[in-house]
Amino acid sequence: MASRSAATFDALVVGAGPAGAHLAFLLAREGRRVAILDRQRFPREKVCGGGLSRKAVALLGCDVAPIVHQWLKGAFLTFGNRSTLVKDLARPAGCTVLRSEFDHLLLTQACDAGARLFEEAAFLDLRFRGDLVDVATSRGALSCRRVFAADGVASAVRTRLFGRHAVAYVPALEALVRVPAAARERFAERVVLDFGGMPRGYGWIFPKRDHLNVGVYSPFGGSALRRHLDRFMARYPALERRLGIEYRGFAIPLRNDAGAFERGPVALVGDAAGHAEAIGGEGNNVARASAALAARAAIEDERGAVPLRYTGLLREALLPELRAAWRLARLLFAFPEFSFRHVVSNDRVNALFAGVITGDVGYRECLRKVLLAAPRWLFRAPATPHDLPPLEPGVPG
Ligand SMILES: Cc1cc2nc3c(=O)[nH]c(=O)nc-3n(C[C@H](O)[C@H](O)[C@H](O)COP(=O)(O)OP(=O)(O)OC[C@H]3O[C@@H](n4cnc5c(N)ncnc54)[C@H](O)[C@@H]3O)c2cc1C
């Protein structure tokens, strides 16, 4: 990368995670001159459960099969590994992947479409110059007509333009647990979603080819995540028979309270924009959905003649869904044991949530129907969840 005579691109995408790679792919495919830079070298690790719902897979537009670790037929829905419902779907509910492989696949797709990749190049600063933006990176300068910030939850571009507090986020902690094959088999083909796994949140177990990804998250935030995660794992004898463990923590964005999504020729996408689904902390599909809207806005309004075009598309197509997800998350996790007994264990209601995972039901529709059905699920006796068997026998008290 030249540091004195900067190359000029139609678009510069900062960050090559799912949001950035997808956006670079969409713009390059339309013949735009696209540069994508990342401070890391790919393939690289990313803290993430690597769970892709069916709707996330459908959004991909490329064949994910070669990198799938496990196709999922459903979930074990449980409270503290005591009462457990098995919820299977007629078609795969989704799959698990390793983010190093998934992100590399998306980035390769972008580069094959013509995007030019700059690795180990960190965004440092930007400056507006007429119709252009000059971007300083750790490996030199670049000029472009538009900048897309896809540099994750702690986005340096967002901080530069909108300050430190535009996006609210919460911590999440995961552990990569290596267990003997027999113990892994116990969870194969289903994820565990444990509503007692973390106060006002949940714990997950996602099966991978050679390990289990186990984690905890609460949309209300929280502290002492390591203690909650260890306590959650101690409820599952299979996880106690482990051969190795690696803890990794990061943050999940919840909201962009400032409504700060773009300024002039700079737009924020994915985690950088504060986009994730608050119920499960699922962000890969949202990252690509916001990238698709940013690409559409850029292509439809090449000259930037319509102010806040991208923000308008977000308000139409994505933000109402994310807000509904946020409300549902608060409803579900404020009193998780009550929710598990009355809401999650209710077949009609959990069918709605299954629809959200497959993409057949939107969050707004789900919220509306859950609220409309409230008199039934609130006042009717729960579906005997305490008589349900534990997922794994031998649970400590
Ligand atoms: C513990 C945990 C578990 C999760 N589990 C799931 C899950 O199972 N399913 C799911 O869908 N989502 C999950 N998520 C959320 C998901 O990881 C994110 O929503 C998703 O990665 C967002 O994609 P992105 O492209 O916006 O950002 P990222 O994937 O974070 O990509 C940002 C990229 O920008 C680069 N970058 C950062 N700063 C700079 C800079 N200054 N200059 C250049 N490059 C930079 C980074 O190196 C990175 O490659 C989880 C998150 C956490 C924390």
Image (cartoon, helix red, strand yellow):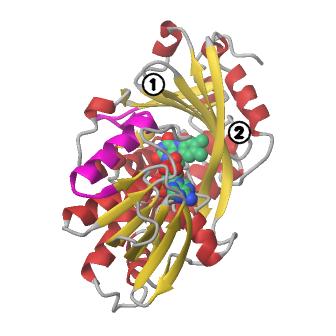
Q: Quadrant of residue 235?
A: top right
Q: Nearer the viewer, residue 328 or 261?
A: 261
- Give the labeled residue for mark 1: 208
Q: Earlier in the sequence, mark 2 or mark 1?
A: 2
Residue 360: x, y in percent? Answer: 32, 53
Q: Secondary structure at mark 1?
A: loop
Residue extending farthest front: 4
Q: Residue at x 41, y 60 (%)?
A: 1
Q: Name the amino acid type tagged 2.
A: Met
- As displayed, is residue 193 above or below residue 22? above
Q: Residue at x 59, y 16 (%)?
A: 392
The segment highlighted magenta reads: 88-116
Residue 189: x, y in percent? Answer: 40, 24
Q: Name the amino acid type tagged 1.
A: Lys
- As displayed, is residue 190 above or below residue 288? above
Q: Nearer the viewer, residue 210 or 217?
A: 210
- As displayed, is residue 67 above or below residue 333? above
Q: Secondary structure at mark 2?
A: loop
